[in-house]
Amino acid sequence: MRQPLIAGNWKMNGSRSSNKALLDGIKAGIGEVKSAEVAVCAPYVYLADVEQQLSGTPIAWGAQNLSTEEKGAFTGEIAASMLLDFNCKYVIVGHSERRTLYGENDDIVTRKFAVAHSAGLKPILCVGETLEEREQGITQDVIARQMKAVMNTVGAKVLGEGVIAYEPVWAIGTGMTATPQQAQDVHAFIRQLIAEQDAAVAEQVRIQYGGSMNAGNAAELLAMEDIDGGLIGGASLKAEDFLTICRAAG
Ligand code: PEP
């Protein structure tokens, strides 16, 4: 039985005071979330506040990115060890905004996954096709390329110690959610890809859906067999919406 993971991706939003209000709201309602794991991925500069506000609660926290390097002369970068210093559990790697706006290719994403994992973080690996790729009928090719870049380098076992997030690029921040069946089809395909290398890992690895999941559509997406939670952008910025999604996950 896979424990669903609902993770908020705050992106470049928030302030010290609005984050506190958001986390106070989430903490107040977390008791009604029965079995899902809940996490928030905050901007780096707020991780100290987040750690202070969430320590001792069931809510985990993480970052949205990390450096490919361990330490040294890399101005402006943040190392995995630094995230661990703030007791981060998770770190998002390969988000489509990083891939498209900051030129992160499969090679960079793979290095980030490997560095995060060896440091003891749980990487959340994002994969997903653009609208153009879906319309060309090459969704599976794109997903297979993104998945295999990481899996063939780190191995299926290490991959399975992280989390996968299927995030169709056309659904992120657009309000255009994948239908439950569209999402389920890709999730099953991802699980099958992993099963070709390791059936046990495929069975236990969590595959989240991300892309305009909200309080209104979460339940039907989360009801699908291979959808094990959600990576939530916009709807993670409102405590009540985020909690409704968390409750829908169980
Ligand atoms: C995301 O940023 O990972 C995401 C899924 O965003 P949104 O929920 O806003 O589409």
Image (tube, rainbow, N blue to C red):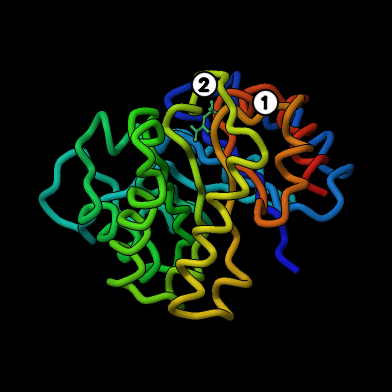
The amino acid type of the residue labelled 2 equals Gly
| Dot 2 crowding, Cα within 10 Å, few <14, some 14–19, many 20+ | some
Task: Please give the count of numbered marks on the rendered protein.
Answer: 2
Q: Tell me, yes or no, if residue 87 can be seen here.
A: no
The alpha-carbon separation of the residues under discs 1 and 2 comes to 9 Å
Q: Which residue is drawn at 57% across and 47% down?
A: 61
- The crowding category of the residue bearing disc 1, from other C-alpha atoms within 10 Å (few below 14, some 14 to 19, many at least 20), is some
Q: Residue at point 58% right, 80% down?
A: 200
Q: Is mark 2 within 8 Å of ligand 1?
A: no
Mark drawn on residue 122: none
Residue 18 vs residue 6, the one in the foreground: 6
Label 1 belongs to which residue?
22
Q: Quadrant of residue 24?
A: top right
Quadrant location of the N terminus in the rendered image = bottom right
Amino acid type for the residue under numbered disc 1? Leu
Query: What secondary structure is marked by label 2?
Result: loop
Image location of residue 125, percent across then percent down: 43, 53
Answer left or right for 65 relative to 16.
Answer: left
Q: Mark 2 points at which residue?
A: 14
Q: Position of residue 161 (x, y in %)?
A: 51, 70
Q: Is residue 121 visible?
A: yes
At horizontal 49% and vertical 63% (from top left) the residue drawn is 162
Mark 1 vs mark 2: which is more N-terminal?
2
Q: Is residue 233 left or right of residue 145?
A: right
Relative to residue 108, is residue 33 drawn left or right? right
Residue that extends furthest to the left in the rendered view of this protein? 73
Q: Tell me whether the residue at label 1 lies in contact with that at label 2, contact meaning CB atoms closer than 8 angstroms.
A: yes
Instruction: Please tell me which residue is depicted at 43% across the width and 79% down the height of the picture.
Output: 197
